[in-house]
Every structure is written in structure tokens, then in C-alpha cells.
Amino acid sequence: MCNSGQIRPQIRHWVFLLLLTFLTGIGAELPDAAPTTGSAAGGNPLLKLTQLSLEDLMAVKVDTVYGASKYEQKTTEAPSSVSIVTQDEIKRYGYRTLAEVLGSLQGFNVSYDRNYSYLGVRGVSLGDFNSRVLLLIDGHRVNNNLTDGAYIGTEFPLDVDLIDRVEVIRGPGSVLYGNNAFFAVINVITRKAGQVNGTEVAGEYGAFGTYKARVTIGKTFTNGLALLVSGSYDDSTGPKELFFKEFNNPAHNNGLAENMDGDSSKSFFGSLSYRDFTLQGGYISRAKVNPTAENYTTFNDPRLRTVDDRSYVDLKFAHEFPDALDLSARLYYDRSGFQTGYPIGDPTATSFFQEVQAGEWWGAELQLSKKLWEKHVISMGAEYRDDFRQTDRIFEGGTTYTAVHTNRQSHGVFVQGDIALLKNLHLNGGVRYDQYGAFDPSFSPRLALIYNPLPQSTFKALYGTAFRTPNFLELSDPRFQKIQPEQIKSYELVYEQGIGTHLHASLSGYYNQMDDLILFENGRFANVNADTRGLELALEGNWPGGVRSRASYTLQRTENRSGSLGFPDSPEHLLKFNLSAPLLRNKLFAGLDYQYTSRRQTVFTTPGGTTMAGPDAPGFGVVNVTLFSQNLVKNLELSAGVYNLLDQSYSDPSSRYHLQPQIPQDGRSFRLKATYKF
């Protein structure tokens, strides 16, 4: 790993541009102060900020977030570093999946192994289904009960067109959510029936034979009943050929995987609301051909194919008792399924094993919140969950080789409070108790001190803890029963600064101490210890007339304290830049998205099952451009996007289940999309 004195010249160049953007943005946004004599104070941007009128300060818009405290609050008051991505931004930048949305933010990197998308958070990406991030849809837990996986690619159960906004809450969140809220909580807020207010029909066509169709109906009736239903179908043949040099010999088709990247899914989402009740449900079935010969399978065999099914139904009650308290309760049922085939052996004479996993669970949640003296908020809650079905069967023909059937119950209770020590100084703290199966109970405290010395200045000192218990996959083999739950302690300082009415800057520094991280290494699961530290700098702008921008730089370093292999897929430098500007006022917008990822370590697995370090994946930068129009023709939205515009050749690190250390990614591609509203 390189040190700070070895930062690549292009990184230094872009950091300079980021700081220049920050400084020029200050000058552009703040009104000129009255000249001072004998002093440079008139050029001090923070001094200028204090001279804004009360009306100007009141006009400054501050985003709100729900997932940070389980009630609506300003992001500047949340006990976390928070990012919000809106539906408008998703359209303007042409994001096609939740993975692309998250990949645009500081501290996050996304890798793709031609089957699933893996999310790296603050220097840690272990290629194991994103089980250290808690993913929610309108507060409903989406992580399954087989791998605890949070699917964010084409396997994510919600069409991105149905997203109203995405709340990204960094740092441990077990104090409110228990298991899996290890590095971050991501809460996807859906569009409501009134926002659709009619019928939407959407169609897409893109590179690699990609087609997609969606129909959405939303209506709010005069009696207050609100209904939204939506169905989507997506199909892609993928690149005709993919080359993997590790299989470059005549016995393996000279390394060419032909017609082996198909991806097809169908999904449904529905929501019905009346007064204090909301009934919501979703379903997706996604089939993906895997071209990588993962898990020691036969190369270029289309039977290496995974099918994921995910469904849920959720009933929520939320009521505000005036001058008393707020009550919310949730009852839910979920199902998750996975099946795949493993062709193994010589290409001319293979055995074909199949694996089928299924999980079902139900649960209930209750939360009470009370506001005291108009400045303090106290919340408490409880949760129960019953994973009553967790099964895994591996078989060939009529012969069963592995059959695991188990279940697990869990429960947790929490209490948290936001106390106003002074008008501009808040203390936020809480603790949660969890019991997961037969593991020892977990206690998850969190503490935050939030200080606002100026109307648009915020300082946050944050301490949090979280845990992740071994999942069904990790425990399904008795040899791995001795692994321990993961633990994290996180320390973070955050400085947020509003600049005028249109700019917002943030600076975060953090240190995470992680104990007993679970890795698959040398054919088995094991616990390792690690530390990560980092710095995140971000600047966002939103101007009248429709100009929007976001720039960020991340410096992060992860160290394996157990002395085994280093951490793969952990870039030291991340640089993100987005800009959207109107070409025709309120009708036509151009969007630019640039992302740079520095070099990353890789690992691979030898045919004998040994995990080895591979060659580093070089750093790369990708440019995406999008044209988006609305109401050029009444009720019609059009979008045209080019991805990897400069046709950059790059690869992502593979997981520990691959024979190859790097997975090549797509070159230049495109998408055309039309949405019509009735």
C-alpha cells in the first residue's frame, strides 16, 4: 500500500480541483461584505456568512433523514454522516441500479463479479453479499436470512424508477437496527401514489441486447385511500464474448466465455395506504448466467446459472397522539430463495450438481417516541424475529450430498434520546440489547455530540458500535461452527458547513476497529481483526435554474491485524464528480458523472483450495454522460446515456470463490429510455 507521499499525480491534480471548486464556490455564493479598512476581513468567506440576513438563512434548504434516528430530522441534526440521493438526480445522471447510485457517493466503491454487485464501505469489501450493510425499503429490512445479503444490482427487488430518495447513513447502526447495521444503513424511500397520480409506461433499450419495460399505476382517492402498483421486466443477453486469460487453452475454449452473461428479471411492487395503515409488498425473480467458472466449475458451461427470488409483505401502523407520543408498529413476512447449478469436470464429461436454498421469516417491531419540552426526544422500541425456515440442499440426480434444515429466533430492545444541553448543543445517545439464536447477547451503545456554533456550521463527534452474527451460509457446515460474531467500534469527527443558500460542504475523519471479521480463506471461514481509518471531503451545490453538482475525495487505509492476507478491493483513493446543467430551461439537462478508483489488491483461489494474493487491479477512471428531457412533449420523459464514454479498459477484484483474481468489466455502452405519463 502506498503512503501519502506516493499519491498519484492525477489524484493530487483532482484534489486541487476539488479544493479550488470549494473556494471559488464560496466566493460565488456569498454576497460581498462591506469593505473593511486595514483588514482582509471583507474577503473572509466565513465572516461573510455571518452577514447573511435572517431571511437568507431561513431560505437555506436542509435535507431531512428518517433512518438515522427512526424519526424525521434534519441531516445536520442526525447522529451520523448522511448523504441523500433524490429521484431527480437518479434521472439526470442515468443511474440504472441502486449499485450505481451508491457508487457515486464518497466512501463507497462497487465491484461486479458478473453475477452480483458488491459494496465496499470505507475501505472494506469482502465479496460476501454485502452482509455488513443494512438495506431497507421504507424501513423494511431487505437483507435475506440465508447470507444476510443486501442485493444492490439487478437483483435488488425495487425498480429504481420507484425510488423517491435514498438515505445513506454511514457508521454503525446496531443501536437502532441490531444485526447487519455494521458499516452503514441504507434506507430506500419509495414514491407514493400521489407522486405518480396516474399511469406511467416506461421502456428501455441498451447495449448488449438489453430491454426493459415498466408499468406503474398510482392514485389517491377522495376518501384518503392511496394505491400504487408497479411491474417491471428486464432482459439482457450481455456481451457475446468475454475473455479470461486464466482459461486460455484449447480445453477451455481458449478462454472465451460465449453467450454466458445473460441477465433476466421480473419484479412487482405494491403499496396500499389508508389513514395510519400502510400495506406494502414486493417480489423479484432474477436469473443470471455466470461466465466466470466460479466455485471450481467447468468453464463456458451455461448451466452455471443462479436464480434469486425475494418477496415480502409489510403492514405498518403509525399514529401521532397530540401532546402525548408517536407510535409506530410493523408486522411482516419475508421469503428468500436461491438455486444454482455446478457443472464440474472435463468439458466433455461433466457432473452436474445443483444447490437449492430457501428461507422464510416473520417479525414484528414496536417503537414509541416522545418529545419533551419542545426540545428533547426520547424513543424506545422492541423487535422480534423468527427465521422459521433456513434450508440448503446440494444434490445430483436423486443423490443428496448436503441437507441442512435449521431456524433461529432473535429479539432486541433499544432506548435512545436526543437531549438539548444548550440551544445549539445536543447530546444524542442510546443502547440496544440483542439476543440472536444461541450466541451471547450483544449490547450496542452509540453516543454523539452535535454542536452548531453558527447557523450553517455543524460539528459532530460520534462513537458507535455494531455487530454481525454468523449467517446461515457461514454456519451451514459444522466445521465452521466455532466462528464468532463480528464487532466494530467506530470513532468519527464530522464538520458540515453550509455556504450561502446553494452550497454545502462536509469533512469527515474516522477510525474503525473491527474484531472477528468473518472471511472465507483456504476453503473455510475464519475470524480476523482489522483497522481502517479514512478522510472524506465532499461539496454539493444546487443552484436556481437547475444546475446541480457534487464532488468528493476519499482517502482510506485498511490494515489486517491478524497478519494473514491483506484486504482486497480496498482502494486507497476515491474521487467522484457529478455535474448536471440545463441545456433548455426546465426541459433538457446534460449530466456528467466521473469516478476514479485507485489500485486495489486482489486474491484468488487455487485449484487446491488455497487462497492466494493476486496482482493488483490498476486504478481507473470512468466517465458517464446523460441527456435527460422532460415535457419537451407533454407528459413524456426521454433519456439517453453513454456509460464508460472513453471506453476505459479495467477490471474489478474477484471474490475468494474464483480462480481468477480480476474480472474484466464492460467497455463503452449505452441506454435509451422513454417514460410516458397518462
Image (cartoon, rainbow, N blue to C red):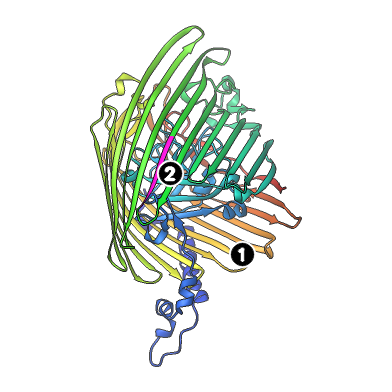
Position of residue 628 relative to residue 184, above or below, is below
Q: Nearer the viewer, residue 491 or 544?
A: 544
Residue 120 — which label? 2
Viewer-proximal residue among 619 and 587: 587
Let me know if residue 447 appears in the view: no
Q: How many labels were placed on the picture?
A: 2
Q: Position of residue 384 (x, y in %)?
A: 34, 33
Mark 1, other Cα within 10 Å: few <14 / some 14–19 / many ≥20 = some
The spot of residue 632 in percent (x, y) is 74, 58
In whole angstroms, how far apart are the C-alphas of marks 1 and 2? 31 Å
Q: Label 2 sits on what residue type?
A: Gly
Q: Name which residue lies at 37% across and 45% down.
A: 183
Give the vertical position of 508 relative to 662 (above or below). Answer: below
Q: Disc 1 or disc 2, which is closer to the eye? A: 1
Residue 95 rendering spot, x and y as whole percentages: 58, 48
Q: What element carries label 1?
A: loop
Q: Give the range drawn in magenta.
A: 325-331
1 and 2 marks in contact (CB < 8 Å): no
Q: 485 or 259, which lies in front?
A: 485
What is the x, y in percent for residue 168? Answer: 44, 50
Q: Is residue 47 above or below residue 2?
A: below
Residue at the far bottom in the pictured view: 37
**Residue tagged by mark 1?**
546
The answer to whether residue 297 of the structure is visible from this angle is yes
> Is 218 left, or right, of 297 in this rendering?
right
Which amino acid does the dot numbered 1 rest on?
A: Gly
